[in-house]
């Protein structure tokens, strides 16, 4: 998912540790961003865990992607459904 075609909002999931977790972010290159998260160079809250991509949406502009990211970060029900497999990936 390379940056020449827009911006992406993504949801990552992990089952590492006692509690399953999600992380929402945006990027122009989701694959590179996932590698950064898994190598410990991503956001502080993602360090020390192995993440996988649960969900991706594409947007034309950075502003659209950042707005959607803001909304998904607050939609715990949607993220829980992704973790539980209720929403197909």
Image (cartoon, rainbow, N blue to C red):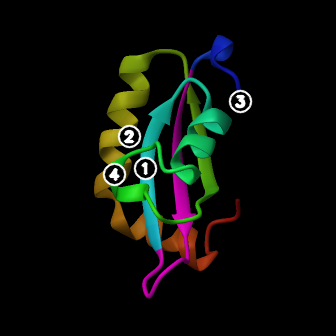
Could you tell me residue 14's position as x and y percent? 55, 69
Q: Residue at x 34, y 57 (%)?
A: 45
Q: Secondary structure at mark 3?
A: loop
Q: Residue at x 40, y 24 (%)?
A: 64
Residue annotated with mark 4: 44
Residue 24, numbered label: 1
Q: Earlier in the sequence, mark 3 or mark 4?
A: 3
Distance Cα–Cα, label 1 vs label 4: 13 Å
* 25 and 88: which is toward the camera: 25
Mark 3 in CB contact with mark 2 (< 8 angstroms)? no
Question: Which range of residues does the magenta coloring cover?
Answer: 7-20
Mark 2 in CB contact with mark 1 (< 8 angstroms)? yes
Q: Secondary structure at mark 1?
A: strand
Q: Residue at x 45, y 63 (%)?
A: 22
Residue annotated with mark 3: 1
Looking at the picture, does residue 41 appear above or below residue 18? above
Q: Residues within 10 Å of mark 4 (few under 14, many from 20)?
A: few
Residue annotated with mark 2: 69
Q: Secondary structure at mark 2?
A: helix
Q: Earlier in the sequence, mark 1 or mark 3?
A: 3
């Amino acid at each position: 998912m390379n940056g020449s075609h827009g911006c992406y909002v993504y949801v990552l999931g992990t089952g590492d540790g006692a509690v399953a977790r999600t992380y929402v972010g945006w990027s122009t290159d989701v694959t590179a961003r996932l590698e950064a998260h898994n190598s410990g160079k991503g956001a502080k809250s993602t360090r020390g865990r192995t993440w996988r991509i649960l969900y991706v949406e594409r947007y034309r502009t950075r502003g659209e992607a950042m707005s959607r990211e803001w909304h998904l970060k607050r939609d715990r029900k949607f993220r829980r459904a992704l973790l539980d497999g209720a929403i197909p990936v």
